[in-house]
Structures are given as structure tokens and as C-alpha cells.
Image (cartoon, rainbow, N blue to C red):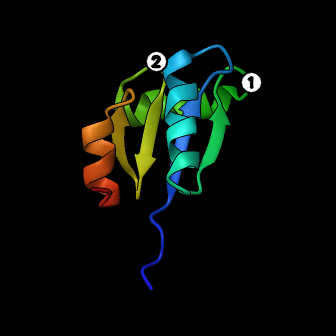
Amino acid sequence: MQTQPKVIVFSTPTCSFCNLAKRYFREKNIRFNDVDVSRDEKAARDLQRMTGQTGVPVILINNRPVIGFDKPKINQLLNIK
């Protein structure tokens, strides 16, 4: 059995694309860590340093950043058909 990739979603509670991404992961039974950058300033700084992004969602899949809810790229990285 294949181990699931590590998925981290950097989001805010009011971000509609963040919520779409999280709903998509739940529908696909993909476990993920949700990091609320509106409450975690260190995570927000780390995210900006890592990706140059201040907007959300940014999704890390095995430390590979996906900017926005880019379903084709997410599917490719997670090997979802």
C-alpha cells in the first residue's frame, strides 16, 4: 500500500478557494494539515519566504508548492485520475 503524500494547506477561514481545496481533499479522502495563516504569523512568514506568495491557498504536497486551487496540478502530484 502506498503511503499518502504529506499535504499542508495554508489558508484563511474567509478564503473561498481554500475552502474548495479542503472540501476536495475531504471528498478524495486525502488527509491534510490546515494552517490558518491569519492566526499563525510565523507560518505566514515561512510561506512567503518559501514561495514568495502572500495570498492563499498555497498547498504543499511533499514540500512541492501548488499556488491556488490548481486542481490539475494537485491531481498530478497526488496521482488522482
Q: Where in the figure is residue 75, as x and y percent of width and height?
A: 31, 49
Q: Residue at x 49, y 60 (%)?
A: 6
- In the image, which disc is placed on residue 58? none
Q: Is residue 33 left or right of residue 76?
A: right
User: Which residue in the rendered view is the most extreme toward the top?
Assistant: 14
Local crowd at mark 1 within 10 Å, few (<14), some, or many (≥20)?
A: few
Residue identifier under label 1: 39
| Three-letter code, disc 2 | Thr
Mark 1 vs mark 2, CA separation in Å: 14 Å
Residue 48, percent from left and from top: 45, 27
According to the picture, the residue beneath numbered tag 2 turns out to be 54
At a point 44% along the width and 32% down the height, the residue shown is 58
**Most distant residue in the right direction:** 39
For mark 1, give the secondary structure.
loop
Against 74, is 49 above or below? above
Give the vertical position of 40 relative to 81 (above or below).
above
Q: Which one is in front, 78 or 54?
A: 78
